[in-house]
Every structure is written in C-alpha cells, then in structure tokens.
Image: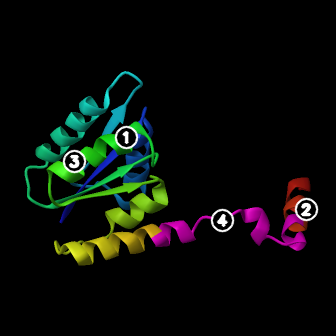
Amino acid sequence: MKNIILVTHADFAKGILTSLELVVGKTENIDFVSISARETIPEITAMIEAKIDGFHNDACTVIISDIAGGSTTRAAMELLVRRRNIYLITGLNLGLLLEVALLPLSGEDSLDRQALKNAIESSKSTMSLVNDTMDEQDFSQMSDLEEL
C-alpha cells in the first residue's frame, strides 16, 4: 500500500484526480493540495504534512508536484528531511499519475525507488511530437476525412 498526494497550483490536482478516477475508478489513499499565490513555503509544507497525517497509516507516501522548481516542490522537499518513507516526483501529468497509482510498492526503499524511476521513465517514453511520427500519407488521410 502507498499514499499519494498531488501538490499543484490552482485546481490542477483536483482535476487530474478526477481524470484518474474516470480511468481507474474510485481511488483510495490519494489526496491533493491546491495552492494559490498567497501561501508561503512553510504553509504549503504544513498543508502537505496534514494530508500525510490524515491517511492514518504507516505506508510510504509519494508526493507528485507540478513544477520541478516551483513552490509546490520546494515545500514538499522540506518533508524529505523531516519524515521518512516519502518520495517526491515532479512533472505531474495523467500518464505519470496512472503509472504511480497502479504501481505496487514493497516498502523496501531501494526497490521502491527503482519502481518509481521505472514509472517515471515509462511516462516519459509516451511523450512525443505527433507531427514527427506521422508521414505525409497520414496527413493526407486526415485531410480527406475533413472534406467529408
């Protein structure tokens, strides 16, 4: 078992959690923190920590933030020092969230780190510029469909 906390600016976390539940159904042990421009780093850290405490279990917690250098990530980094069994991933997107949500974690740090790295790499591998993967025939077929 694992806990997941999504930490994003505005309502992104709430929306992507709704999308995850559309794909996989109701989820347990996943929560979110949405921030505005008003909160300080210590306030955001406290918000994340309250969510962790709200799970009422000793399972590891995976925090996924939206922007690598953003306040969401900097606030979560504070918890890496203060608490154990916390993993922090940046670059939240639905593919990554699906990978992590469906990932079984063992509770053994080295295995869990590797599993999370694999999930990140798998998510990255699905990103592409579709224009580069289509040839002229694909574009031609799309134009033909538009004329119908």
Mark 3 or mark 1, which is nearer the start of the sequence?
Answer: 1
Q: CA distance from mark 1 to mark 3?
A: 12 Å
Q: In the picture, residue 12 is in which quadrant? A: top left
In this rendered view, identify the residue nearer to me: 104 or 115: 115
* Mark 2 or mark 4, whichever is nearer to me: 4
In this rendered view, identify the residue nearer to me: 111 or 2: 111
Q: CA distance from mark 4 to mark 1?
A: 26 Å
Q: CA distance from mark 3 to mark 4?
A: 33 Å
Q: Residue at x 8, y 59 (%)?
A: 58
Q: Residue at x 20, y 51 (%)?
A: 81
Is 91 left or right of 58, judged from the image as shown?
right
Q: What's under tag 4, amino acid-wise?
A: Ser
In this rendered view, identify the residue nearer to me: 45 or 106: 45
Res. 104 in view: no
Q: What's under tag 3, amino acid-wise?
A: Leu
Q: Which residue is mark 3?
A: 79
Range of the magenta residues?
A: 121-139
Is 77 left or right of 59, judged from the image as shown?
right
Q: What's under tag 2, amino acid-wise?
A: Asp
Q: Residue at x 24, y 38 (%)?
A: 45
Q: Residue at x 72, y 64 (%)?
A: 130
Please rate how many residues cluster around mark 3, counting C-alpha atoms within 10 Å: few if below 14, some from 14 to 19, many from 20: some
Q: Which residue is mark 4?
A: 128
Please rate how many residues cluster around mark 2, counting C-alpha atoms within 10 Å: few if below 14, some from 14 to 19, many from 20: few
In what element is the residue under mark 3?
Answer: helix
Task: Look at the image and name its color scheme.
Answer: rainbow
- Badge 3 vs badge 4, beta-carbon distance below 8 Å: no
Q: Which residue is mark 2?
A: 144
Q: Which mark is residue 72?
A: 1
Q: Which mark is residue 105?
A: none
Mark 4 or mark 2, which is nearer the start of the sequence?
Answer: 4
